[in-house]
Image (spheres, helix red, strand yellow):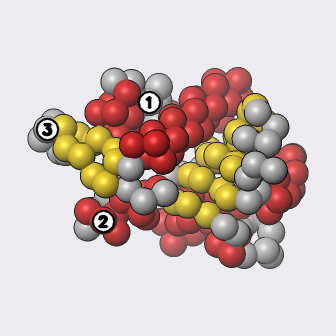
Amino acid sequence: MAKNIVYFDLETQKSAEEVGGWSNISKMAMSVGVTYSTARGGYQIYGEKQVNDLITELQRADLVVGFNNLRFDYEVLHGYTAFDLTQLPTLDMLVELQNTLNHRLSLDSIATATFGVEKTAEGLQAIRWWQEGKLAEIAEYCCYDVKITKLVHEYGVQHRQLHYENRFGKKLTVPVKW
C-alpha cells in the first residue's frame, strides 16, 4: 500500500504584528488550511470551524510535507490543540534546505527557478482578504501554495536537487535527499 503523503499549508487571520510578534504565532488563528492527500488524490479545504478535522488528517498521514510548517503552520495549529504536532512524521523543506545552505530560501524563489512560476499572492494579502471576508480568494491562494509545495517535493524526489534564485537573481542548484 502506498504511503499517504499529505501536503499542507495554511493562512492566518492575524499578522505577527497584531498578536505581539513572532513569539505569539499560536495566537494568529487559522483562516483557511489546505491539504493534498496522495491517498485521497485530491485537495481538501478547511475553514477555522474544521480545524480539528485538519489536525486529524495530519495525524493520520504517513508523512506531512510543507514549507516552514514546523515553525509556522504547526505553531498556528497549536493554538487549537494540546497535541504536539512536531511529533508527526514531517518533512519541512525549508528546514532541510536551510540546513544544507545555511540560509533560508523562499518557496517562490524555488518555484520560479525550477518551474518558471511564481506564487499568486503572499501571506499579508491573505490576511487582508480575511478582513474583507474573501474566503474563496484565500482558499484559492492556499491551494496554489499546496500545489507548488507538492511539485517542489516531487521534483526533489525525482531529480535529487532543486533550483532556486539567489537574492541577485542568479539561478543556483541545491542537492536534496528526500
Please give the name of the residue rendered at 80% of the width and 62% of the height, measured from the top-left corner: 59
Residue identifier under label 2? 100
Q: Do the CB atoms of the residues marked 3 and 2 lie less than 8 Å apart?
A: no
Q: Which residue ends up furthest to the front in the rendered image? A: 1
Please give the name of the residue rendered at 70% of the width and 69% of the height, measured from the top-left corner: 88
**Distance of label 1 from label 2 (alpha carbons):** 23 Å
**Distance of label 3 from label 2 (alpha carbons):** 18 Å
Could you tell me residue 44's position as x and y percent? 78, 36
Q: Earlier in the sequence, mark 1 or mark 2?
A: 2
Residue type at tag 1? Lys
Q: Do the CB atoms of the residues marked 1 and 3 lie less than 8 Å apart?
A: no
Q: The residue tagged with tag 3: helix, strand or loop? A: loop
- Residue 119's label in the rendered image is 1
- Residue 170's label in the rendered image is 3
Neighbor class of circle 1 (other Cα within 10 Å; few <14, some 14-19, many 20+) is: some
Neighbor class of circle 2 (other Cα within 10 Å; few <14, some 14-19, many 20+) is: few
Q: Quadrant of residue 76?
A: bottom right
Residue type at tag 3? Lys
